[in-house]
Image (cartoon, coloured by chain):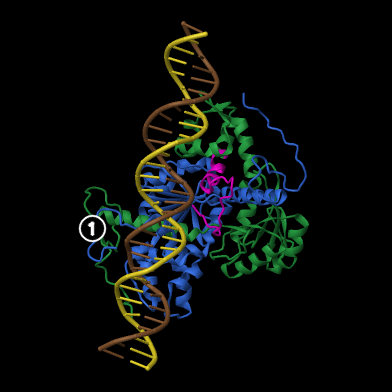
Chain colours: A blue, B green, C brown, D yellow
Amino acid sequence: MATGRTHRPATRSRGIPEATVARLPLYLRALTALSERSVPTVSSEELAAAAGVNSAKLRKDFSYLGSYGTRGVGYDVEYLVYQISRELGLTQDWPVVIVGIGNLGAALANYGGFASRGFRVAALIDADPAMAGKPVAGIPVQHTDDLEKIIDDNGVSIGVIATPAGAAQQVCDRLVAAGVTSILNFAPTVLSVPDGVDVRKVDLSIELQILAFHEQRKAGEEAAGEPGAVPLAPKDSGKGPDGDVPAVMPA
Amino acid sequence: MATGRTHRPATRSRGIPEATVARLPLYLRALTALSERSVPTVSSEELAAAAGVNSAKLRKDFSYLGSYGTRGVGYDVEYLVYQISRELGLTQDWPVVIVGIGNLGAALANYGGFASRGFRVAALIDADPAMAGKPVAGIPVQHTDDLEKIIDDNGVSIGVIATPAGAAQQVCDRLVAAGVTSILNFAPTVLSVPDGVDVRKVDLSIELQILAFHEQRKAGEEAAGEPGAVPLAPKDSGKGPDGDVPAVMPA
DNA sequence: ATGTCTTTGTGAACGCGTGCACAAAGATGG
DNA sequence: CCATCTTTGTGCACGCGTTCACAAAGACAT
């Protein structure tokens, strides 16, 4: 691209495509593994294979960060680890609160992957008074009443919601009002937030349903032999006819 | 967002776009809520709002399934619930095994969202002999040695991997060899699988890293000139891509 | 220095997904 | 039966992301 200066004001969002941002953590993980094995350099081909992506895509991704490679050699592993870490903002410490300490919330609190890289569980919050003070993963659970104070005292800007669906929006509103601007939502609900707040959703049952769709398609195809000629209902998966009938027909 | 699957042509001759499939569970959830409130019909506008998507997108999504709406009225809720359920393959029962019963695996076993719609936890599997026989979520944990037999006996085609990263690929290989063709992977590793096997990845730390990127960008931008609330000043308030001092230069 | 070989960085084409805007379809009321 | 109103279904254009293919850049050997 431009061999000279960026042709755009600094106030504009840096031109890194969202899809690229989503892959940077993947590259970082692969690079960290290489770094631990003291591998000095790596080619786009090798790294792409380790990250499970196309090598041209990887090179283009890195080109958005700048020209950190050496032609004929590859990329310097340590240098790239640093650059990606910096780009992702992992050179600083991010305090995180987890709200909703049920089975999932407790698992998240115990999850090593959080602390491993830049993230620190600053507090655990739950609405159940019986939980208050009880330590989970070595951190005492605090009551929802103190949510705003906890956010403020710890300078938290990232919140994790692991509450039941019914409580998620309310918790979300309070987090945002208290200053949280990034939310990772595990509750099976659509959260509405004001502009400027990022929400990422992790929905376990949706992932399973998507798998089920493909699974059914696979089963249907092998029954039909060749796809393409079946306009409707390749549904039987070999488990026998189900005799389902629509509960309601359209008027 | 938590995507991640093996690259494949995917679009069969008569295929529903992948992006649409990913939204169907969202619609289904919204429709189920309406159904429980005995709402007879719903317009694309209302349903789209409930699902958090654009109404034109929703109508186009439904058009891939067929013409189930009535112009001037909207969509019949019950009928649409049935059609989407059928399309996703949720009218049949999907036995699922969870491998790796640590904090996360146990949380998944207890997660109500699984059983709620078509999915049934057929077995819990762990490599730790001390876990064997111990009930989790009312289901006794079985040892990894019996993995193949369990898959076979229960006709399992969907597996959930919640093991440490180091064990994931090996577990994956055994699942696939035993007949599993869809895998939901929680381990922070890239799994390689043969063609015909679908993998979806849920990576908690990647989600957080993506949030951190946006969070950093937001913090960097507001340094450019907005008076008033400055919640917390990031140490690395580096604004430009250039100008920062790298810790390590490429050799 | 020069040539060869490796690997990056990127221009360009392509395909997918999104959203606008509108005509067609059907309900509803007179 | 006709007019009007509501809402669907979709043609179309646009932008993003992916991939190919190759010239440029540098390492390395002679």
> Is A225 above or below relative to B24?
below
The residue positioned 73% from the left and 62% from the top of the image is: B142
Q: Nearer the viewer, residue B24 or B104?
A: B24
- Indicate whether A40 appears above or below A114: below
Where residue B132 appears, x then y in whole percent? Answer: 73, 64
Parent chain of label 1 = A
| Total numbered circles | 1
What residue appears at the point 72 percent right and 49 percent down from the top-left corner? Answer: A223
The answer to whether residue B112 is above or below residue B170 is above
Instruction: State whether residue A123 appears in this view.
Output: yes
Range of the magenta residues? Answer: B1-28
Q: Is residue B25 magenta?
A: yes
Residue closer to the observer: D5 or B66: B66
User: Quadrant location of residue D29?
Assistant: bottom left
Q: Position of residue A44 (x, y in %)?
A: 43, 71
Asked where in the image residue A154 lies, by quadrant, the reply is: bottom left
Vertical position of residue B80 compared to residue A55: above or below? above
Q: Amino acid at mark 1?
A: His
Q: Which residue is mark 1?
A: A7
In the rendered view of the protein, which quadrant contains the C terminus of chain B? bottom left
